[in-house]
Image (cartoon, coloured by chain):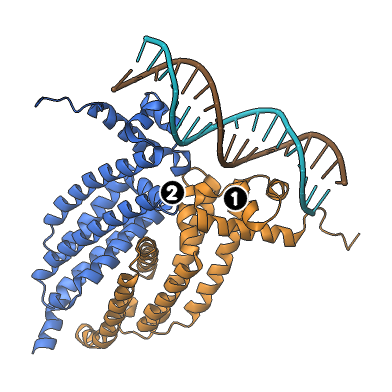
Chain colours: A orange, B blue, C cyan, D brown
Amino acid sequence: MTTKKAATHDPATRDRIVRAALETLREEGFAGTTARAIAARGDFNQALIFYYFGSVAALLVEAFRNMSEAQVAKYRAAAAEVRTLTDLVEIARRLHAEDLESGSVTAVTQLMAAAVSDEDVGKVILDRFQDWIALVEEALKGALADQPLGGLVPARQAAYAIAGMFLGIELISRLDPERSEAEAVFDMMGSMAQLVEQFAPMLAGFVQG
Amino acid sequence: MTTKKAATHDPATRDRIVRAALETLREEGFAGTTARAIAARGDFNQALIFYYFGSVAALLVEAFRNMSEAQVAKYRAAAAEVRTLTDLVEIARRLHAEDLESGSVTAVTQLMAAAVSDEDVGKVILDRFQDWIALVEEALKGALADQPLGGLVPARQAAYAIAGMFLGIELISRLDPERSEAEAVFDMMGSMAQLVEQFAPMLAGFVQG
DNA sequence: GTCTATACTTGGATAGAC
DNA sequence: GTCTATCCAAGTATAGAC
């Protein structure tokens, strides 16, 4: 009794289905993510989706929750490294590249769209954005702690704006075959961070003295 | 001969179809925007879509092009009013509210998603983003022209980042039943614009003298 | 727990009447 | 130029064998 075998669901199969669903979502888009397409990609039987998840929509919600957790963990680890504004920009640049590479940007795009017709998806994705924003807020506080005048910046709103910017840039650059523009944008932000780090002490002298 | 009646297409009907398509896209999402759904919403016959546009996908491309033109015109008019950074923020706030209200944010979301499986859609929407960015660049130049040190800001990259931010904030706040957060973000940006307008002259003194 | 087979539904698209 | 009727492809979901 104590060694009960989790009843009727094999976790390995479950995992295969989830992975195939995400892959399909990235490659084919939301509209193309049908039970048949998922099953073909993961090379398992179509009926398993319904046996494990009840419906394609429910599977998508679950799959996204999975991906989300992995990604937030990655972001959290990266945020812990941030000490300066320049750090923040460089880490953002790296994450941006990784997200594009892995296709997770595409998946997010698809799910934002799916949210129109499915409330559950909307909730899950909004939660994830909230996680994002909270992370940026932490990182920002870290970067501004040693910065004179850092306390003047309203961290929550700034984090919202920065997370939005990050998302927006990812979405635009995903559509753009010329990815180089986004690179230039990160270069610019790097320069600006350095400028702030250089001049903020001066301004602080003004304000305080 | 000179008064030939444009052959076989009635512009009024064409327009009805386009409008119904956009409405359906906003209300039902890309996946729900079927020929039948569009026809039901616009109260015309399903077959007309194929007679006028050949396919649902082609109709969507056309419809988006239409919406796009109207919106870019609106943005252009707004951009012409920008004189200061504070102006820029206030106008962005207004456009943000209007876009959410009109549902055009939702339409853009759907089309970004559709772009995965349809190259034409991808091209059209990227063009539109490029228009956006160019507009922001103009507005930015306007706002920085009278600003000391304004010449130091690389306008193109900054415009890319700002347009991205605007898009990202629209997308996040569309999902959020609590719209108030975005408001607070614009408030913050307003304060920052004022700060820059106040302190840039001081810094300019430093740098130049 | 997985597969086959299939019922049922919905959507794209077209032919042909009006 | 618009409508009716319909074909066909593709999708969801389930029953039932293994």
Q: Residue at x 35, y 83 (%)?
A: A86
Where does the image place residue A98, in percent across and percent down from the top left? 47, 73
Q: Which mark is residue A21?
A: none
From what the image shows, is residue A161 above or below residue B208? above
Label 2, on which residue?
B177
The chain that hosts pointer 2 is B
Instruction: Please tell me which residue lies in front, B78 or A156.
Output: B78
Dot 1 falls on a residue whose secondary structure is helix
In space, the residues marked 1 and 2 are separated at their CA atoms by 33 Å
Where does the image place residue B172, in percent across and percent down from the top left? 40, 56
Estimate how packed mark 2 is, as few (under 14), some (14 to 19) or many (20 or more) residues with alpha carbons within 10 Å: few
Type of the residue with mark 1: Ala
Indicate the quadrant containing the N terminus of chain A: top left, top right, bottom left or bottom right. bottom right
Q: Nearer the viewer, mark 1 or mark 2?
A: 1
Q: Is residue A140 visible?
A: no
Instruction: Please tell me which residue lies in front, A13 or A151.
Output: A13
Where does the image place residue A52, in percent across and percent down from the top left? 71, 50
Q: Residue at x 55, y 48 (%)?
A: A120
Label 1, on which residue?
A37
From what the image shows, is residue A90 above or below residue A179? below
